[in-house]
Image: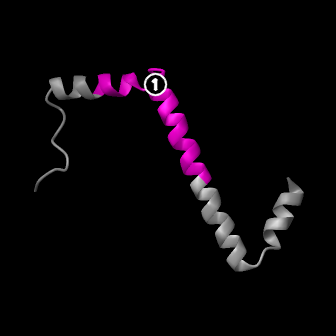
Amino acid sequence: MLEIESAIKGLPKEDFWKLAEWFDQVKAKTWDEQMGQDAEAGRLDFLFEEAAASRAAGLSQPWPVKA
């Protein structure tokens, strides 16, 4: 890990920012894939249940909230 950190610190600024952008894209793709797997497996169902209960109790508002 120290070798990677050292290599990154030694990059020219332009290359550093290209790497940072690439890394952000990889993180976003990984996040999206994990969310999809979790949703497919039903691990996010509790969120829908909470939203339905909130709506049934009259605790939610339309979104976006109109002023």
Color theme of the render:
one colour
Q: Is residue 6 left or right of residue 38?
A: right
**Residue in view at x 71 percent, y 78 percent:** 13
Q: Tell me, yes or no, whether the highlighted magenta stretch contains residue 36.
A: yes
Please provide percent x and percent y for residue 6.
86, 65
Type of secondary structure dominating the magenta stretch: helix
Q: Is residue 52 left or right of residue 32?
A: left
Magenta residues (range) = 26-50
**Residue in view at x 16 percent, y 50 percent:** 65
Question: Which residue is label 1 attached to?
Answer: 40
Viewer-side residue, 67 vs 15: 15
Q: Secondary structure at mark 1?
A: helix
> Quarter-wise, where is residue 52 in the image?
top left
Viewer-side residue, 25 vs 6: 25
Please provide percent x and percent y for residue 15.
71, 74
Q: How many marks?
A: 1
> Quarter-wise, where is residue 57 in the image?
top left
Please provide percent x and percent y for residue 42.
44, 20
Q: Does 32 sit above or below residue 14?
A: above
What kind of residue is marked 1? Glu
Please provide percent x and percent y for residue 67.
10, 56
Q: Tell me, yes or no, whether the highlighted magenta stretch contains residue 10.
A: no
**Residue in view at x 60 percent, y 64 percent:** 21
Q: Residue furthest left?
A: 67
Q: Is residue 24 left or right of residue 50?
A: right
Viewer-side residue, 1 vs 58: 1
